[in-house]
Image: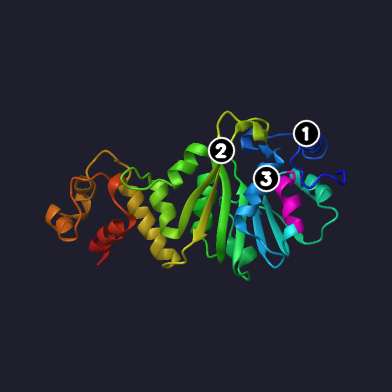
Amino acid sequence: MLQSKQTTLANLPVTRHIVQSLGGGVKKSLGQNFLVNQKILLKFINLLDLTKDDIVIEIGPGIGTISYTLCQKVRKLYLIELDREKEKALKKVLENFTNYEIIIEDASVIDYAKYFGHLKNVYVIGSLPYNLSKKIIYNLFNSNLDWRKSTFILQKEVAEHYTSQPPQAHFLGIFASIYSNVKLEFVIKPECFYPIPKVYSAAVTFTNKQEGSIEDNLCLSNFIKSCFHFPRKTILNNLKKYSITSDMLEVIGINPIKRPSEITLDQWKQIYHLIVK
């Protein structure tokens, strides 16, 4: 399928051919956009510093643009794909490899324990559909998958939310910080995809902190999210329903007139402990 001089599938004519002849076309409802820039694809994959001994889970492989290169780099590749019509394309694109497995599941609700409970130190990668990216990341972070590092291509605006910090933090930035050290690596132009999306994208890495239990982290993140429902209110007003007073906040060094976006993760943890102690 590929000429010998080509090293990746990130090529517009090749991508169009695979999508039209094997992949069942482009499904906008599933947010399908495929990388067609080889430099960006390699730069994206290299964010994980993979070796031949590593195990990788790719979310939303589509026609295998990223998968083709990953199979050359790692010991085992698991592909979580929602669109059954892409399975034919994946098998054809990866016909010269034996180190992959396709799992037809929805990554926003997949039970990671069912498929990957036996794995350790897994890497996760994916160019995620814009309309499902937050649900996919939420499900991954609140699973018991033993993952080391993840890198995703997201809508640029969403990527900036995940990497935001006080005093201008978005809830997603605090949420990501509960589970990981997060970094926006680089911005990607719309022309690097087929079809061309209307917005810019960005590559983001999440390095697992492995702190706290799944249950504790979930409760903490749900509590913080509830306080972000009214981001313009002071933290004191957001916490009245928990019987938290200004004196209680001042004792732990938090100004009660601050907004949720100004509160650090450590401060959120202090507030949460006031409520659950």
Say which label, 3 or 1, has the lower sequence index. Answer: 1
Residue 41's disc number: 3
Give amino acid for label 1.
Answer: Arg
Q: Position of residue 2 (x, y in %)?
A: 85, 44
Say which label, 2 or 1, has the lower sequence index. Answer: 1
Identify the residue under disc 1. 16
How dense is the environment of label 1, judged by Cα within 10 Å: few (below 14), some, or many (20 and up)?
some
Q: Position of residue 146 (x, y in %)?
A: 56, 66
Instruction: Assign a secondary structure to mark 3.
Output: helix
Residue 201's disc number: 2
* Residue located at (46% from left, 64% from top): 209
Q: Is residue 156 above or below residue 255?
A: above
Mark 3 → mark 2, Cα distance in angstroms: 13 Å
Give amino acid for label 3.
Answer: Leu
Is residue 3 among the parts visible in the rendering? yes
Instruction: Assign a secondary structure to mark 1.
Output: helix
- Name the mark nearer the viewer: 3 or 2: 3
Is residue 106 among the parts visible in the rendering? no
Magenta range: 63-72
User: Is residue 64 covered in magenta?
Assistant: yes
Quarter of the view holding residue 49: bottom right
Give amino acid for label 2.
Answer: Ser
> In terms of depth relative to the viewer, which is nearer, 92 or 5?
5
Instruction: Considering the whole magenta stretch, tell me its main secondary structure.
Output: helix
Q: Are marks 3 and 1 in contact (CB under 8 Å)?
A: no
Say which label, 3 or 2, has the lower sequence index. Answer: 3
